[in-house]
Amino acid sequence: MSDKDLPDGEHRTPEGVSDATVEALGMLSEALETVERARGQLYTFHQLTGEADLALGDAVDKLREAGHDDVARRISEDLVGRNVLPGRWTFQIVEDYDDGYWQVFRDHERRAREELAGGVRHLAEARMKQDRRTDGRPGHEVSPEDVEG
């Protein structure tokens, strides 16, 4: 164990793993976290677009009820249920992203971690925690098991 490691048993640098490797894996993990955030935004886009389409359908119904059949028909035929990209609704975009990018990214991050650090996650962050925490202070415990209750 390096003196840089978090002494919790789960976040110790395996024998022979260099500081440079820990740093590189940390950067890879950070990149994955950014992709996870992007994926969340994509799901937000998907849900908001779906909500908008349903609200648009309600607006079209109200236009019909108000006697504006031509406007309602034009909007309904051209915009309600329209693809947001050629041939795709948002669920198809999400599926393509998940299968063609997100999962591939996750697989590469996991495989690199397994090959280079025995699968240990968040080594760089654990080192940062160890470096920044004040040993023995409440709120600075190594793990939940160390919190006195």
Image (spheres, helix red, strand yellow):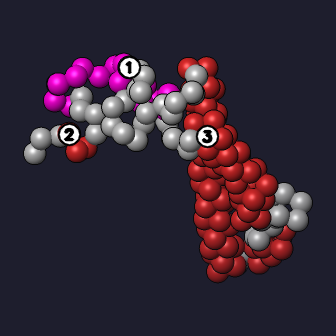
Report which residue position mark 3 lands on: 113
Give the amino acid type for the residue marked by disc 3 in the picture: Arg
Residue 23: x and y in percent read 58, 23
- Secondary structure under the numbered disc 2 in the rendered image: helix
Q: Label 1 vs label 3: CA separation?
A: 21 Å
Which mark is first along the chain, 1 or 2? 1
What residue is rendered at 73% in x and 62% in y?
95
Q: Position of residue 111 (x, y in %)?
A: 67, 46
Q: The residue under label 1 is which amino acid type?
A: Asp
Q: Which residue is mark 2?
A: 146
* Residue at mark 2 to residue at mark 1: CA–CA distance: 19 Å
Q: Give the residues drawn in magenta, as a range.
A: 123-139
Residue picked out by circle 1: 3
The one nearer the camera, 15 or 106, is 15
State the residue in front, 46 or 80: 46
Q: Amino acid at mark 2?
A: Asp
